[in-house]
Amino acid sequence: MKTEILEYIKEIQETHIEKFKDTAAEVEQFRIKFLGKNGVMNQLFEQFKSIPNDQKKEMGQALNQLKTAAQQKIEEFKSYVESKEESSHLHDLTMPTDFSDLGSRHVLSVVMNEISEIFSRIGFTVADGPEIEDDYHVFTALNFALDHPARDMQDTFFIEKEPDVNKPTDVLLRTHTSSVQVRVMEHQKPPIRVIMPGRVFRNEAISARAHCIFHQVEGLYIDKKVSFADLKQTLLYFAKEMFGEQTQIRLRPSYFPFTEPSAEMDISCNICGGKGCNICKGTGWLEILGCGMVDPNVLEQSGIDSKEYSGFAFGMGVERMAMLKYQIRDLRLYFENDLRFLKQFESII
Ligand code: PHE
């Protein structure tokens, strides 16, 4: 029996995986041969029962050696087969790939595109202008008085400031997209029907409700006989498209240097439907934009005859639109680029 065992051990030691062709199946055969129910090990254990007691110790040790050798060999084969399978997967070019994480549009782009899209359906085109502007396009051409507080350093980021207030040639970051209105009127003859989305800057401390960078979409419509009724109807159409068919609007008198008359527009609260909640502070209304009839001075300043033409303008904050649409409570979230926030808008195009 001893020699038999030693021969088996030798056989095991000399069996190398390279001998196998269909490896996984052959490894299994090898296992059955040694460790299977009717395999070598069990047969030897049967014989072991009937050997004389004085040989039991030696034979027992030899048998254990054989068993360990067989088990080790099988483990070795198995890990070889597994690694071979894995590497063959790596080279299988027909396997489906893991989808890499695609980025998504930022919620502000989504909302800005949606606003542009709504106005493009009624014939508005999109215009663009510089973020670094001069005093003329941001203030003077828009009828801002020389001592208007917006011209103060506390409200506006100046890049170069002219010390003489009577000669405003300052270079600054635009505080509103209304400057693009001026640029459009300088280059285009009426009829004009444009919206102007873009980034604006104000010298504000950053908090949940205020930021030094934000986005606006400006609108300008100039033609013969444009009236306040056209303004109201255009904005009602916009509000319903943006916030749903049930949305109502209300206009409150306001003041902007470049529009006369001027108004602020509220929509009925899209959260509580007008009943009053903490978003609308119990009023049932949410303020969404400023608007008005373009002041004749502004038209004249840009070379448009105010006796022949009239127009309306409006401007809205994109962050605020997104806040109302998706109930975002903190302005800072837009700029922190926290993936947990950004990923919530992945499915919106
Ligand atoms: N520019 C104004 C603002 O930033 C908004 C506005 C635009 C008002 C056009 C009237 C007309 O608040």
Image: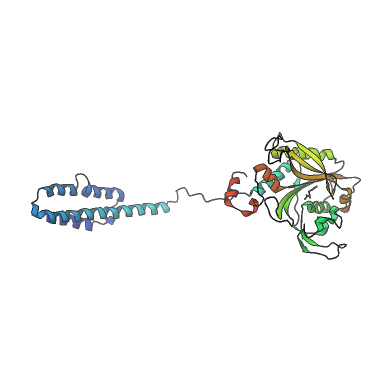
Q: Which quadrant of the figure contains the C terminus?
A: top right
Counting the numbered discs, the total is: 0
Quadrant hosting residue 267: top right
Question: x and y percent of residue 214 in the render?
Answer: 71, 52
- Most extreme residue toward the right is 307
Question: x and y percent of residue 64 in the render?
Answer: 19, 54
Q: How is the image coloured?
A: rainbow
Question: x and y percent of residue 167 in the render?
Answer: 87, 63
Would residue 240 be seen by someone viewing this image from the given angle? yes
Viewer-proximal residue among 13 and 312 = 312
Would residue 22 be seen by someone viewing this image from the given angle? no
Q: Residue at x 13, y 49 (%)?
A: 48
Question: x and y percent of residue 228 in the render?
Answer: 84, 40
Viewer-proximal residue among 209 and 302 = 209
- Most extreme residue toward the bottom is 163
Viewer-proximal residue among 220 and 255 = 255
Quadrant hosting residue 165: bottom right
Viewer-proximal residue among 3 and 283 = 283
Q: Residue at x 58, y 51 (%)?
A: 339
Q: Residue at x 18, y 49 (%)?
A: 41
